[in-house]
Image: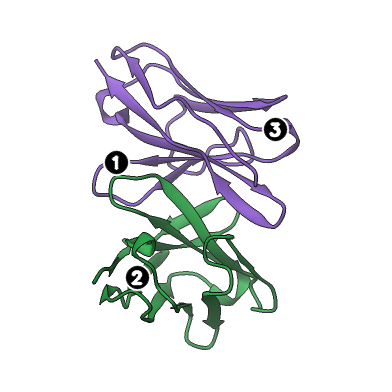
Chain colours: A green, B purple
Amino acid sequence: EEQLLESGGGFVQPGGSLRLSCAASGFTFSNYAMNWVRQAPGKGLEWVSAISYSGDRTYFADSVKGRFTISRDNSKSTLYLQMNSLRVEDTAVYYCAKEFEGFYPWGQGTLVTVSS
Amino acid sequence: SYELTQPPSVSVSPGQTASITCSGDKLGDKHVCWYQQKPGQSPVLVIHQDAKRPSGIPERFSGSNSGNTATLTISGTQAMDGADYYCQAWDSSTYVFGTGTKVNIL
């Protein structure tokens, strides 16, 4: 069974940093592009970032460009999201998702709260 | 930036057909996916490449995409189909999600 497990969420003050991780299992991680998607409390889905299967291409939403970095370690089957200069509006549940003919599966999400 | 617009809510009686639209400029030129999200759960892919159902998704879910509008149709709606639904497309090196539609089962 394909599974994704996010970790690293928590409480941080504005301007701070966090690194999220997404551990993959049940599929050959290095064969697939991966994505991060977030959902603010009570709001809709917002795509955040994508990375190619090899890691040589990355893409970002305008709202996080220049502040967030996406990376992967295929030897560890793990995806990362480095979040710097965090803002109150970055507060959300962050999901990772495997990309192949759509996003499937999704992880259970990890909550990031940015507040003073 | 590219935008996908969905109606905030759709109401349907059990056994009837629910149609959820997703509007965007020249959306028919892109591939659209649809996701179902129930409260407290992660999204689930129900349609990809406009009209294809992933394994395990019931046949009552179908999709179409033409012109500026993609449509998710739920035929013979069941109580378990009450959820939020989001469309998604790729444009200019970014993914875009629709505004989301809440399907209310009457």
Mark 2 burial class by Cα count in 10 Å: few <14, some 14-19, many 20+: some
Is B3 in front, or is A4?
A: B3
What x and y, as percent, mark residue A29?
A: 53, 74
Which image quarter is the C terminus of chain A in? bottom left
Which chain does the residue under circle 3 lie in? Answer: B
Which chain does the residue under circle 2 lie in? Answer: A
- Which residue is disc 3 drawn over? B25
| Disc 2 residue type (three-letter) | Leu
Q: Residue at x 49, y 29 (%)?
A: B6
What x and y, as percent, mark residue A86?
A: 40, 73
Is B92 in front, or is A66?
A: A66
Residue B9 quadrant: top left
- Which residue is disc 1 drawn over? B38
- Which residue is disc 2 drawn over? A5
Relative to B104, is B54 above or below? below
Relative to B35, is A72 above or below? below
Mark 3 burial class by Cα count in 10 Å: few <14, some 14-19, many 20+: few
| Disc 3 residue type (three-letter) | Asp
What x and y, as percent, mark residue A25?
A: 42, 73
Helix, strand or loop status at disc 2: strand
Residue B24, numbered label: none
Q: Is residue A93 visible to us here?
A: no
Q: Residue at x 28, y 51 (%)?
A: A41
Mark 1 burial class by Cα count in 10 Å: few <14, some 14-19, many 20+: some
Q: Are marks 2 and 1 on the same chain?
A: no
Q: Is residue A91 visible to us here?
A: yes
Q: Is residue A9 left or right of residue B101?
A: left
- Eye-nearest disc, 3 or 2: 3
Give the spatial CA distance, label 3 vs label 1.
Answer: 28 Å
Give the spatial CA distance, label 2 vs label 1.
Answer: 19 Å
